[in-house]
Amino acid sequence: MRNNGTFTILGLAGSLRQRSYNRALLHAAQEMVPPHVQMRIFELAGLPLFNEDIEAAGDPPAVQALKDSIASADALLIATPEYNYSAPAVLTNALDWASRAPNHEPSVLVHKPVALMGATLGEYGTVRAQLVLRQVLASVECCVLLKPEVFIARASEHFDSAGKLQNRQTRQAVKQLLYELLTWAKQGGSSFYYA
């Protein structure tokens, strides 16, 4: 928790589309956080593809901004679509950049509490994408919340035409995920919750 007593969650959406369901999920979560919690969303569109030649010249401003945002957050909330039975490249690219630190220092991801959720038009609700992300996050030593699982299938049925999450059960699932992330992260996390 930051010095001012405010708990900070950083949201990352695995879709670059402005009207994506996963970005809308993060906006719904922003509406549900308690008063003492601040939730910010970091836009991944400006990140270059990871390249060690670029890294050797120094992190680009967008990469440094991502690392600074992760470092200053108490927890991460990732909303992911599923592409080709896997996680989107925009997310894995962001994690590749964030996992890097100079002089063998720990990266900003080490021991960071993370919760996952995802929405898709398909029938499986991003189960496979989240499994891929759990493997990646475990490898960079994040602490990943195991339960509750939020897999939203047939996403168009859960949001209105303006992109607002309307489905009552889905709203409750997101609210419960936030509650569990906050409770667990404030307790310092536990190895039980590693992916």
Image (cartoon, grey):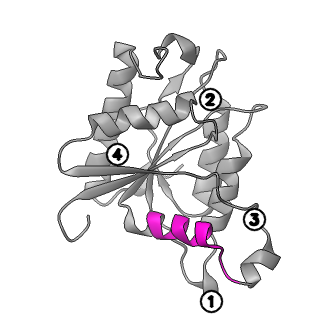
Distance Cα–Cα, label 2 vs label 4: 19 Å
Per the image, the residue denoted by label 2 is 126
- Compared to residue 71, the image places residue 158 above or below, namely above
Query: Disc 4 designates what residue?
Result: 181
Q: Residue at x 59, y 47 (%)?
A: 134
Q: Is residue 88 above or below residue 6?
A: above
Q: Earlier in the sequence, mark 2 or mark 3?
A: 3
Magenta-highlighted stretch: main secondary structure?
Answer: helix
Residue labelled with disc 1: 103
Residue 110, image x, y percentages: 50, 68
Task: Return the residue at label 3.
Answer: 50
Q: CA distance from mark 1 to mark 4?
A: 31 Å
Image location of residue 25, percent across then percent down: 46, 31
The answer to whether one can see residue 17 in this image is yes
Tell me if mark 1 has few (under 14), some (14-19) or many (20+) residues whose alpha carbon lies within 10 angstroms of its own: few
Q: In terms of depth relative to the viewer, which is nearer, 151 or 13?
A: 13
Element on which disc 4 rests: helix
Give the amino acid type for the residue marked by disc 2 in the picture.
Answer: Thr
